[in-house]
Image: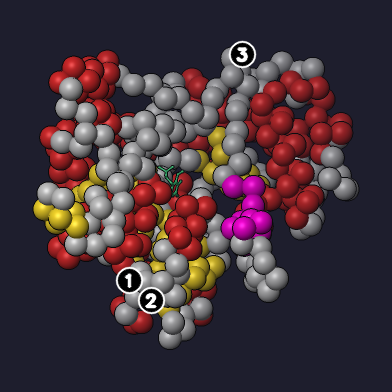
Amino acid sequence: MGGVNVLDRAGARTLAIRGGKPVNASPVGMISVKLDEADIEAAVGVLRSGMLAMGKNCLAFEERFGQMSEAKHSLSCANGTCALQLAYGALIKPGDDVLVPGWTYIATVSMVVAAGANPIFCDVDPRTFNIDVKDAARRVTPRTTAIACTHLYGNPVDIDGVERLADEHGLRVIYDAAQSHLATYKGRGIGAFGDAVTYSFYPTKNMTTGEGGLVTTNDDDTAAEMKLLRSHGETSKYIHGKIGFNYRMSDVEGAIGLSQLDRIAERTEQRRANARALDAALAEIDGLHAPVASEHAEHAYHLYAVRIDPTAFGVGEDAAEMAGLRDSICEALKGEGVMTAVHYPRPLTRQPVFDRPGMEHLAVCDRLAGTLFCVPIHHNLTDGQVAGVGEALKKVADALRV
Ligand SMILES: Cc1ncc(COP(=O)(O)O)c(C=O)c1O
């Protein structure tokens, strides 16, 4: 990093990385993956039965997940990337232009490319971090057939805005809810909206099946098409009506998922309570901003992304300097016993795989890459740990601000 190193400032001497007393005696981690005894027993029950392939547990899991997220059809699958492939396979065609956010995990967009379609990158809202519908509207052309956007970090997108745009131009809508189990919009489960919604149950997610995924839809034909794609286009035993894949979930995973659904509501409420406590702490800290839930949305807080105002720390707009400040803040927080994570270090337009000559970079996405970091928010945190995160944020910001 050129320019200022904020950790060299006189104020930094109180920090634990400069020999001060850390706020938290033992580290508060970003991730805590714990299976309950009930989950383990459910998995063992399937192992003992010998019926390991997709079966009654997957079906029961699908049905209950669909009900909880207010979707008519619900199909489990091998992981969240396969869920995207099923949705895109049913709803977009090779050669289509598909509107996507420039700020999301790569799978939302890489699977558009895998489906043979062209991603059209759109900028995002600087406060909610989700697709900016006005920017998306500017990019619609006669070739645009769909919008595939992420309910990022647990925060639903501006669904009304997306649906207005889709209605106006006859677009399909696919929501990637890999990070947003049980989020709601206008009091309804997010499964109630769009042409398809996809989920991931990777271990770090709000609920897990080990690896695992699921896709929901409210349309009978889309559900039938995705079901065929999931299992080799098989219309009846060994009769194949179309080319498909094996994207099925195993019944061991289905049983774990079904068991986890007993606690997902309680866990989500715990994450929301943790977020309220951090929001209150950040309201007292100049230069750091709490994440903002979209209007009408109830956030599921998979991640809690803090936004830095670089000017409060005497740092200019240069991308490398902003990222340097962010990294210094994360280093100082680690010293205070608070682990952090950067989701994501680069916008997608700057990923080597997409950053080809002529690629248009996006101002808000570029800025988020230097100014966001995530602090622990998971459902296994104690109130004391959450308070410790808030205190450490205050100590670090007070020490480094100008
Ligand atoms: C937004 C988003 N989409 C898709 C995925 C892919 O899910 P999986 O890892 O289950 O394939 C993830 C996983 O991290 C994600 O965060």
279 in relation to 365, above or below = above
Look at 66% across and 23% down and name the residue there: 336
193 in relation to 326, above or below = below
Q: In the displayed structure, does residue 294 sit left or right of residue 281?
A: left
Look at 76% across and 23% down and name the residue there: 17
Observer-nearest residue: 343 or 159? Answer: 343
Give the residue type at disc 2.
Thr
**Label placed on residue 397:** none
Q: How many marks?
A: 3
Give the residue type at disc 1.
Arg
Element on which disc 1 rests: strand
Mark 2 vs 3, N-terminal side:
3
Q: Is residue 351 magenta?
A: yes
Q: Position of residue 139 (x, y in %)?
A: 51, 78
Q: Position of residue 240 (x, y in %)?
A: 19, 57
Q: Are marks 2 and 3 in contact (CB under 8 Å)?
A: no
Q: Are marks 2 and 1 in contact (CB under 8 Å)?
A: yes
Residue behind label 1 places its C-beta within 8 angstroms of ligand 1: no
Give the residue type at disc 3.
Ala
Element on which disc 3 rests: loop
Q: In the displayed structure, does residue 266 sit left or right of residue 104?
A: left
Q: Which residues are magenta?
A: 344-353
Q: Which residue is mark 3?
A: 25
Q: Which residue is mark 2?
A: 145
* Mark 3 crowdedness (10 Å alpha carbons): few <14, some 14-19, many ≥20: few
- Between the C-alphas of marks 2 and 3, the distance is 53 Å
Quarter location, residue 42:
top left
Q: Which residue is mark 1?
A: 172
